[in-house]
Amino acid sequence: MRIRSRFLLGFVAIALPGLLLSGWFAISAWRDASRASRAIQMTQLFSDLGRAQASFAVQAGGLSIAVRSPAPDMASLQRTQEAALQRLAAMERSARAVGMDLPQAREAAALLEEAMRRLAAVVHLPPDQRNPGPLLELLGQRTPLVTGIGASALTAAREVMALAPEASSLVELALQAMVLRDVSGPRALMIAGWLNGAPVTADGVASATEIGGRMVGQVAAMERLAETVRTPRVMEALGRLRRDITGEAEPYWRSFVAVARARLTPDGASRPWPQAINAYHEFNVRVAPQLLDMRDAALDDVLERVSDRHAEAEQHVWMSAAAMLATGVLVVFALATLLRGLVTPLGLLTGTVRRIGAGELTLAVPARDRPDELGEMARAVDQLRLASLEREALEAAQKAEAAAQLDRAQRVDLLLRQFEAETADVLRGVASAAA
């Protein structure tokens, strides 16, 4: 395995645990952010469901009262009608945002629109000439719709508690506030019926009295739960609950029940009601939002908590992603620096050694000026190159000297042969002369 590959594997082995850990933190934070985002959506849905359910129930009750009222306030009914339709539309939008389909929203809106149309068709007639039957029959369909919306709200509340356990007490408090409204509703309609001429019965009075006791118990349960939560928003809502419901609305409703009880006796049969139907309806329209004031305060606290959690989780996601990016950049930078400062020069030095081995002794050895071990290797290679160059020069000198000696020997030998030939010629001439 080449050194470059070893360095790459080494850096991957060192950086991988850090990258995996940062990735695990990023994925965990992303999951927390997703859960918090879902909790925000479900809390909004829970809130819209509760508001739509209350508006729908109040408007349906108001329409049933108006059809038997001598002079119903149509302008007020139109305003509450528009508010109810808007809240039903908001409920449907919130449901679609979380992937739910709530046909109750469309059915409730259609019911209110048809009920208002039927009321407008008869409201100009004197009360004794009206036929409230068709309208009351239509409004009788509201019970399954109110129940269905309430069931969806309970489902949303349970999911919020599963997604954000830290907000469970607040969600429970919001549910208790919705129960308070549900408890008070039947008594309010019962009193409205009495004011419109429905007969007062002992069973009805007993039921209204029992509802009053349940109201007191429900408020006490909400007070205990609010004391365990003790957020500023909830404590302010608790103060308003004690003032507006316990201190004002409950005595007001009980005054009607007291009159109804008195009317069951011979001496009190003609006793007047504390207020007429229109004033009573206006009071209930004003008090209805106050019954759910605690719910809104609790859900606002839930939204604040899950929003803070979502923001914190998103911050962790970005921090983990930044850590991964920084780790990756540092690893790449360190690896590039190492490759550029060590592996690349080492490769050049290896190539230089090969060229020197092939006989190229006049080239320049790279990295000789480095102060590290690679520089020492380069200087050693350069010394080897210089030694090889000196050896080649010496060998060349020796070869030149040998060639010169051989040339001299050849010239001496030639001279000797020439001398011998000349001497032979002289001796032959002397011999010829002597003969």
Image: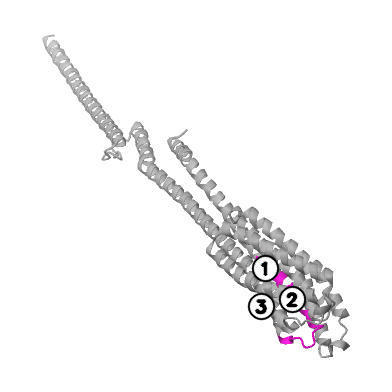
Residue in the image at 29% along x and 37% along y: 372
Asked if the magenta segment contains residue 60, the reply would be yes
User: How far apart are the alpha carbons under marks 1 and 3?
Assistant: 19 Å
Span of residues in magenta: 47-75
Question: Relative to residue 388, is residue 93 depicted above or below?
Answer: below
Tag 3: amino acid: Arg
**Local secondary structure at mark 3:** helix
In the image, taking residue 121 as reference, residue 176 lies left or right, namely left
Tag 1: amino acid: Asp
Q: Quadrant of residue 288?
A: bottom right
Of residues 5 and 323, the one nearer the viewer is 323
Of residues 61 and 383, the one nearer the viewer is 61
User: How far apart are the alpha carbons under marks 2 and 3?
Assistant: 17 Å
Residue in the image at 68% along x and 64% along y: 216
**Residue 48 shows which numbered tag?**
1
Q: Quadrant of residue 194?
A: bottom right
- What secondary structure prevails in the magenta region? helix
**Local secondary structure at mark 2:** helix
Q: Residues within 10 Å of mark 2 (few under 14, many from 20)?
A: many
Residue 42 in view in this figure: no
Asked if the magenta segment contains residue 64, the reply would be yes
- Closer to the chain start, of discs 1 and 3, is 1
Q: Position of residue 190 (x, y in %)?
A: 79, 73
Q: Position of residue 120 (x, y in %)?
A: 80, 86
Of residues 50 and 430, the one nearer the viewer is 50
Q: Residues within 10 Å of mark 1 (few under 14, many from 20)?
A: many
Question: Relative to residue 274, is residue 407 depicted above or below?
Answer: above
Residue for badge 2 = 256
Which numbered disc, 1 or 3, marks the residue closer to the eye? 3
Q: Position of residue 119 (x, y in %)?
A: 81, 84
Residue for badge 3 = 286
In the image, taking residue 328 as reference, residue 190 lies left or right, namely right
